[in-house]
Image: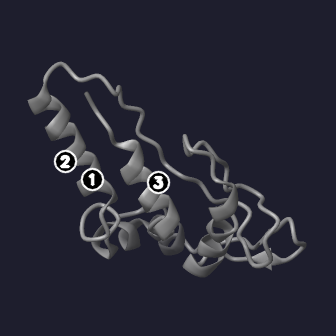
Amino acid sequence: MTLHNGFTKSGLGTAMLKSRAGQFLLPPAQTVSDAASVLDPCMPPDERLSLAFLPAAGSHPLVNCEYAVVSTHQPDPATAAAVRHFLLRAIAIDGGNGPKYVDAVQFVPPPHFISLAEREQEQFD
């Protein structure tokens, strides 16, 4: 059971939050996607960014990215290949970012430009 399902079962609702654009929004997938969409032109090469309280109209104020911090130097080529395979599977739309996993916890897969940047970051020795 997810935390959200527990709240719902207990009779608690989801609050509308005021966005930077002054709108009161629930957190459905579209408001989360709208928040992420404004970052495409300004995402730094190292992908460190915040999705919270973005100025885009329709963007939910509480949006977060999850990160994996991984050393670029692995003990051997086999370990580097295994780590890379795991990370690529985790971000793949038919893997960890697929509906089977993200829908169950009411997450939204990252926009395409973030997925491309994630793949570019995964270089190991």
Label 1: which secondary element: helix
Q: Nearer the viewer, mark 2 or mark 3?
A: 3
Disc assigned to residue 117: 3
**What is the C-alpha distance between the residues marked 1 and 2?**
5 Å
Kindly identify which residue carries mark 2: 85
Q: Residue 30 in the image: x percent, y percent? A: 60, 80
Q: How is the image coloured?
A: one colour
Label 2: which secondary element: helix
Which of the two labelled residues, at mark 1 and mark 3, occupies the earlier sequence position? Answer: 1
Look at the numbered discs 1 and 2 and tell me whether their residues touch, using CB distance below 8 Å.
Answer: yes
Residue toward you, 121 or 86: 121
Q: Residue 78 in the image: x percent, y percent? A: 9, 32
**What is the C-alpha distance between the residues marked 2 and 3?**
16 Å
Q: How many marks?
A: 3
Kindly identify which residue carries mark 1: 88
Residue in view at x 64 percent, y 70 percent: 37
Q: Amino acid at mark 1?
A: Leu
The answer to whether 123 is drawn above or below residue 101 in the figure is: above
Q: Amino acid at mark 2?
A: His
Residue 27: in sight, yes or no? no
Would you say 25 lies left or right of 20 here? left
Examine the image and state in which quarter residue 57 appears.
bottom right
Residue in view at x 44 percent, y 67 percent: 109
Would you say 73 lies left or right of 114 here? left
Which of the two labelled residues, at mark 2 and mark 3, occupies the earlier sequence position? Answer: 2
